[in-house]
Image (cartoon, rainbow, N blue to C red):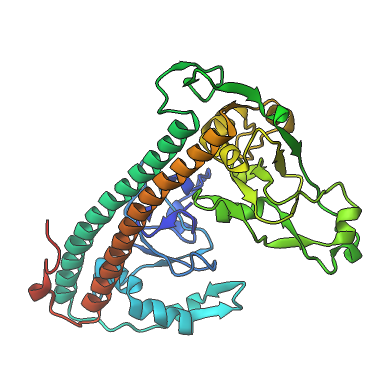
């Protein structure tokens, strides 16, 4: 069963499909898919209107679309299936869809199948439709080839960034080294210590004030770190967290096990999809129970600890996180965490070296992202111009794109 999550612009993601046993004739099922069907996501603020193309499943099993996907099957005597697919992806149809075919509020909107079924679309003769579809097949494939190369380049930048951070927090430029006793490092400089984190930083956590006391959730002005903050931290560019989506009140703080942590406290999300992501509090903040904190002592700087936690993330998630779908790093394991410990001056130099490296790689990544965005815009503009007859595809093929 193809869901809206499986229906991606780049093609159907078969890892996101669901499989069900069915003994009858699948062709009689609502949403049964045939070769050349266009799939339009019917719900969701993030995926509404996304258009996919169905050919066959990897193992050629019968497929159906779920209730959140609209199956569009064009009359082959009037509309070439590929032309119809590209028309649905065009700006002309997408804008018309959101202006005319969508029901509901901004929080819960859906595509009206009845209205969509009544839409008339301008179509040239079939032979011209096929020429347009052939042109778009070739041109979008060429653009996708360039975009794919840029995506690989972005992945390499990300890998170099992570490897550089791990190299620097381990004192990678030091020549006199010894074997590390830490699971996530192979060696450290000879003069460094390797210590249990709890000896150089005070560990803490948080709590959620009871929702059964509405009066505890009035006049909320204390920043409150929850797993929801990970969206700000996922790319590891942000070090200091200065704003939170939710806040708690002073009375809520007083009537719960939450505590107010001082500015500069390092925090780590330890559960669900947020597990392993970390940051530094840019203000005095409280946290939920899904967050663990460390307030550094005089021998440890917050930002060196931050980059240690980010460097060891693969180890935290691979060795310590428990659960198959709902990952959790348990507090007893975090209490036993050990880190390499250079002098405070060295820690500061390492942090500056990490920031310098990241600024350079992030600038390169941003440039590649801009190129990727421009190519995506060109792809969309080609589709719209071709299916709306803005230019003659026989004279436009290949322009502006070189092998």
Residue 379 figure quarter: bottom left
Q: Is residue 33 left or right of residue 294?
A: left
Report x, y in % for residue 329: 66, 34
Report x, y in % for residue 396: 11, 73
Q: How many marks?
A: 0
387 and 181: which one is in front? 181
Inspect this view and state whether residue 393 appears.
yes
Inspect this view and state whether residue 76 appears.
no
* Residue ID at (36%, 48%): 361
Q: Is residue 243 above or below residue 152?
A: below
Q: Quadrant of the C terminus?
A: bottom left
Q: Is residue 223 above or below residue 133?
A: above
Report x, y in % for residue 272: 64, 43
Residue 38 figure quarter: bottom left
Q: Is residue 287 above or below residue 76?
A: above
Q: Is residue 132 left or right of residue 69?
A: left
- Which residue sits furthest left? 395
- Which residue sits furthest front? 345
* Residue ID at (49%, 68%): 48
Q: Is residue 191 left or right of residue 147?
A: right
Residue 367 figure quarter: bottom left
Q: Is residue 83 left or right of residue 105?
A: left
* Residue ID at (64%, 31%): 322
83 and 258: which one is in front? 258
């Amino acid at each position: 069963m193809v869901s809206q999550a499986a229906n991606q612009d780049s093609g159907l993601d078969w890892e996101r499909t669901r499989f069900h046993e069915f003994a009858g004739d699948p062709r009689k099922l609502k949403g049964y898919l045939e070769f050349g069907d266009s799939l339009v996501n019917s719900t969701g603020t993030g995926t509404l209107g996304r258009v996919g193309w169905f050919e066959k499943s990897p193992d050629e099993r019968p497929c159906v679309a779920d209730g959140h996907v609209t199956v569009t099957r064009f009359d082959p005597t009037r509309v070439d299936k590929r032309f119809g697919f590209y028309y649905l992806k065009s700006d002309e149809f997408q804008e018309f869809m959101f202006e005319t075919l969508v029901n509901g509020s901004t929080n819960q909107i859906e595509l009206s199948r009845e209205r969509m079924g009544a839409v008339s679309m301008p179509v040239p003769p079939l032979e011209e439709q096929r020429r347009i579809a052939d042109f778009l097949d070739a041109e979008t494939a060429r653009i996708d080839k360039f975009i794919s190369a840029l995506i690989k380049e972005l992945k390499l930048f990300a890998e170099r960034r992570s490897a550089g951070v791990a190299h620097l927090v381990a004192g990678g430029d030091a020549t006199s080294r010894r074997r590390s006793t830490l699971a996530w490092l192979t060696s450290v400089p000879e003069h460094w210590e390797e210590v249990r984190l709890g000896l150089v930083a005070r560990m803490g956590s948080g709590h959620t004030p009871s929702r059964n006391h509405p009066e505890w959730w009035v006049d909320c002005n204390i920043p409150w770190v929850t797993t929801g903050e990970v969206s700000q931290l996922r790319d590891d560019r942000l070090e200091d967290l200065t704003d939170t989506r939710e806040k708690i009140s002073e009375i809520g703080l007083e009537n719960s096990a939450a505590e107010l942590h001082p500015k500069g406290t390092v925090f780590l999300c330890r559960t669900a999809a947020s597990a392993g992501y970390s940051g530094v509090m840019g203000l005095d903040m409280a946290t939920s129970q899904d967050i663990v904190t460390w307030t550094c002592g005089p021998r440890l700087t917050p930002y060196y600890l931050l980059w240690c936690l980010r460097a060891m993330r693969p180890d935290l998630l691979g060795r310590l996180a428990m659960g198959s779908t709902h990952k959790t790093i348990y507090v007893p394991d975090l209490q036993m965490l050990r880190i390499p410990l250079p002098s405070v001056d060295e820690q500061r130099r390492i942090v500056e070296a990490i920031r310098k490296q990241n600024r350079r790689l992030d600038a390169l990544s941003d440039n590649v992202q801009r190129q990727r965005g421009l190519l995506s815009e060109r792809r969309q503009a080609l589709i719209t111009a071709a299916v709306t007859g803005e230019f003659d595809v026989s004279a436009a093929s290949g322009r502006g794109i070189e092998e």
